[in-house]
Amino acid sequence: MAAATLAVSLVMSGLTFWAVNTIQEDARIHDTRFGSDLGLLLSANAAPLVAEDDLSGLARFSNRFFRSTASIRYLMYADERGDIFFGIPYSQAEVKNSLTIERHIQLPDNYSPDSDLPFIRQHLTPNGEVTDVFVPLHHQGKYLGVLAVGINPNPTVIVSSSLTRDVTLAVFISIWAMVILGNVFNALMITRPIKELLVGVKNIAAKNFKQRIDLPLRGELGELIASFNYMAERLEKYEEQNIEELTAEKAKLETLVSTIADGAVLIDTNMRVILVNSAARRMFGWEGKNIIGENVLHYLPTELTVKLTKPLYQIVTDKIEEEEKNGGVQTESEEESNPTHTEDILSLGDEFRITLTQPTRRTVRILLTQVLEQYHNNVKGIAMTVQDITREVELNEAKSQFISNVSHELRTPLFNIKSFIETLFEYGEDLTEVQRKEFLETANHETDRLTRLVNDVLDLSRLDSSRTYSFCSVDLTQLIEQTLRTYQLNAKDKGIKIEQEIEPSLPAIWGNYDLLLQVITNLVGNALKFTPSGGEVTIRAYKLKCDSNSSEQIPAVRVEVADTGIGIPPQDREAIFERFFRVENRVHTLEGTGLGLSIVKNIIDKHNSQVHLHSEVGVGTTFWFDLQVYQQ
């Protein structure tokens, strides 16, 4: 395994470094082509200015070009002798004196003034390879000098190449560390007990029934070793008895132990229960019932009895018919080639998924397995494994529903945005300015709606995750005033009166400021959305009175958000906090994502509280929740 890991890691590392070098070579070729095209473009525009000795125009053109192109490192213009008369970031002084330093450019040996193509080379710098481009300046057949352009390396390629190398080395080292740790763990915790068990099994096969394994282990290995010692003790005690029956009992015990994490029922060919574990008793409601020796079909839930009766009898009868067809006799050569000559066979049967209603509603997966005897392949019984997959089914359904809802909610704004943009693209010239502005406003509105939906989904995802939030003292007055400042202008535009009723000297509460701000903001935003012009939205906060007869009651503050809006119908109040459920669907509006109240409920749940509501259609709605007072 270590050799295979080394080979794979070396191959992958080699491929990675080869890919990095290929990327760098492609980047170098790209820089060369870019520099060549850029140099020709610059020389074509600069040559007339140099010929006219228009240094001011040359400076303006070069500065504009230098600032607009981030990849240019320098620009230099030199005359026929190679003396630099203008450059960026370097430039000759306008007034020359005895202290003026004249700069001269050292042209490459292969540079040809008569060539129409630029000369390109690369040189290394601390920041990577820089591409130097030397372009002859010609105007009306006259050689005027040379233009030198420096092209910076692509920073993205440099960073990605370095990062790829570092990640490859880190992964290579991590793989080997994991292999080493795995081998150490395997040697310490698994290899030794398995070797001991292997030696013990060989001794048992050699009829040395005094074999015992003494290792202080717990868990499954400990149970296996204890079962092995118990088996050896029984074999030693009953050595003179029928080994075949003992082996069959051993097979039954191993079948039960192998499925101990789930429900397990072992039945014989007459459908009588031989063994059953506690998990199966709990799933089927068999606690306190003595069903050993009873027909399992008389005690299974109705759904299982209907589903499993035919498969159970078919597992038994098919094997019996096969034995009768073969005459029930094996030759010596057949026995030697048949693996069932030395141990029992477990033959995999069918798998069933059934929803039970009794004793509680749950979904289970049933796996039926044949238990075959040692020599003649007779069916000794059937092992029934029962797995409770209720939570798995619920999660799959919730995931499917969530993905379906998100897809549906995303499709509408995306379709609208695409439709309006396509209309503008295809018929924009035929539309009036007012129509174009209306289309753009609608597309912008749908984009905002899409952004809100994505933000709400991300907020809900973060809340559903195992992320922990810090809770401390929170001033509710400050939080409510911040919310009012946010919605004051919106309420004024809609003609809605928004007020606060906060009890004086309100104590601080225990919570998370940002999460509670999101709760108040969502509730007030919903209230404004469903309240008509002339209505009123009120935020209240007051301390609850403690029961004098209760010494364990925790002081709390109640927060209410009330409006005089359209109200919530009774049939919608149970589902109002579900994801993507929108009351406005019934009033045919498109605003909202249907996630706001789900976020509110999730946040309040994290504060060990609950959200309540009271609503009357046409009168208004009040949401309230209680928060614990902060206690030092």
Image (cartoon, grey):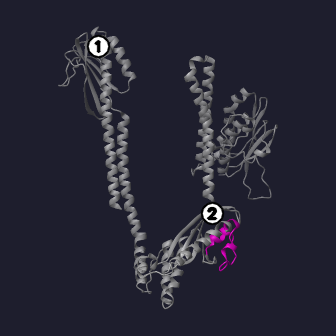
Q: Is residue 226 above or below residue 403?
A: below
Write down the residue under mark 2.
364
Q: What residue type is labelled 1?
A: Ala
Q: Which residue sits furthest left? A: 109
Q: In this view, does 194 lie above or below 602?
A: below
Percent of width and height locating residue 133: 27, 24
Q: Which residue is drawn at 58% across and 46% down?
A: 462
Q: Badge 2: few (under 14), some or many (20 or more) residues near its Cα, within 10 Å?
A: many
Q: Which amino acid does label 2 sit on?
A: Val
Q: Which residue sits furthest top? A: 52
Local SS, label 1: helix
Q: Is residue 94 visible?
A: no
Q: In the drawing, does residue 239 fall left or right of residue 55?
A: right
Percent of width and height locating residue 409: 63, 39
Q: Which residue is drawn at 29% across and 24% down?
A: 36
Q: How far apart are marks 1 and 2 (CA)?
A: 84 Å
Write down the residue under mark 1.
47
Span colored in magenta? 276-304
Q: Is residue 544 visible?
A: yes
Q: In this view, does 415 lie above or below 509?
A: above
